[in-house]
Amino acid sequence: MIKNRLKEIWAEGRPSINGWLSIGNAFTAEIMAAQGYDSVSIDIQHGALDYNSVLPMFQAMRASGVVPMARVPWLEPGIIMKVLDAGAYGVICPMVNTAAQAAEFVSYLRYPPHGQRSFGPTRVSFAAGPNYAGEANDEILAFAMVETKQAMDNLDAIAATPGLDGIYVGPADLTFSLTEGRLAPSFDREEPDMIAALQRIVVACKKNRIRAALHCGTPEYAARAIQWGFDMTTVSGDTRLLAAAAAASVAKFRDLAGQAATKAEKGAY
């Protein structure tokens, strides 16, 4: 089986950067995967896509050699097993609030005797190379999302779940939950209490020798997260990057066109 490059990066003591796909399109996935990310995750939970988009997106990413991952819609065995069979090397599961849920999640990713994953690797048996059944349990990454007050109350127990590879922080929902709706959900929190919560998650992960991951809005904030001890950061995503680049291009054009018009008017006199 082809080895999970993320594990190799972390073993070398280096952080990784994860790309994010919310547009259900293989060409978009191919473009993003070619930009130098270590891994790229398909967002099935909130993305504008369904499973019919997931498999061709994984196929499109393969040429770039990034580690393909997916965020599933919920803690449900069917979709978790299907994204694995499609080729995911890592699964991010939202709204994991207890150690029992974390253990349930892990069980869906592992073949017996370590879990209850059903055997039927339709595409991944070709994409991942030989002996997939014998090595998948050691290569597939399980990330539980901590994004609620309840999850923070159970943080240490969740982080200690056998077989869990990491905690992925959803800062928008976490902010919403911890502040009981007083603060709008968004990335890159600057509130001292929120930064303390993020750093507490890092401590719990380090204590249990698992990886800490954070969804960020900007490279600058991601760099700060790495300084706090996060092993993986996601910086923005396809929709936000497209919107930002398009807006910047239009704004630049408006500015230059305005300057040109002003010069033309002055020249006319």
Image: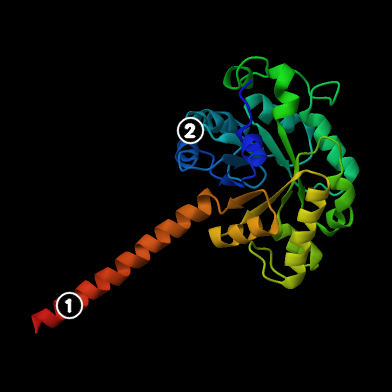
**Among numbered discs 1 and 2, the one appearing first in the sequence:** 2
Residue type pointed to by label 1: Lys
Residue 152 location in percent, x, y?
84, 57
Residue 134 location in percent, x, y?
73, 17
Give the quadrant of the N terminus. Answer: top right
Which structural element holds mark 1? helix
Give the quadrant of the C terminus. Answer: bottom left
The correct choice, above or below, for 88 with respect to 196 in the image is above
Q: Residues within 10 Å of mark 2 (few under 14, many from 20)?
A: some
The correct choice, above or below, for 210 with respect to 214 in the image is above
Residue sticking out furthest to the front: 12
Residue topped by disc 2: 64
Q: Residue 101: which quarter of the image?
A: top right
Q: Residue at x 84, y 25 (%)?
A: 116
Residue 185 location in percent, x, y?
68, 63
Q: Looking at the picture, tell me which residue is in the foreground, 83 or 111.
A: 111
